[in-house]
Amino acid sequence: MARAMFEYTKTVLNKVSFDATLFCKEVQKALQRLLPYEIEELKIFIQSLVQQNPDLNQCLIYLKT
C-alpha cells in the first residue's frame, strides 16, 4: 500500500509541476505521508523535475533536513 502512495505522489507532482506554488504544497503533503526511505527516493525524483522546470527550485527548501 505504501508503494502505491509513493507512485500516486509522483503522479500528482508531475501533474502540478506547471505551478510552483501548488507543487510546493504537494511536496509538503508528501513529506507528511511517505516513509523515510520513500522521501529519499522522492528527493531524487524532484531534483530531476527541477532540472526540467527551474521555477520549482524554490520547493527544494522543504527537502532539506
Image (cartoon, helix red, strand yellow):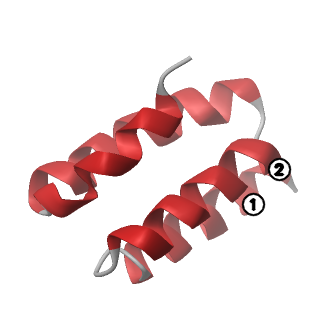
Quadrant in which the C terminus appears: top right
Q: Nearer the viewer, residue 64 or 14?
A: 64
Give the crowd class for mark 1: few <14, some 14-19, many >=20 residues within 10 Å: some
Instruction: Residue 22: give x, y in percent of width and height.
Output: 48, 75
Q: Is residue 34 above or below residue 16?
A: above
The image quadrant of residue 35 is top right
Q: Nearer the viewer, residue 3 or 34?
A: 34
| Left or right: where 42 falls relative to 45 | right
Report the residue at 66% width, 25% height from top.
37
Q: Residue furthest right?
A: 1
Q: Is residue 19 above or below residue 41?
A: below
Tag 1: residue type? Met
Residue, disc 1 = 5
| Left or right: where 60 falls relative to 30 | left
Report the residue at 33% width, 79% height from top.
19
Residue, disc 2 = 2
- Helix, strand or loop at mark 1: helix
- Helix, strand or loop at mark 2: helix
Q: Is residue 37 above or below residue 56?
A: above
Instruction: Residue 39: give x, y in percent of width and height.
Output: 61, 34
Q: Are marks 2 and 1 in contact (CB under 8 Å)?
A: yes
Report the residue at 54% width, 75% height from top.
12
Quadrant in which the N terminus appears: bottom right
Tag 2: residue type? Ala
| Left or right: where 38 falls relative to 35 | left
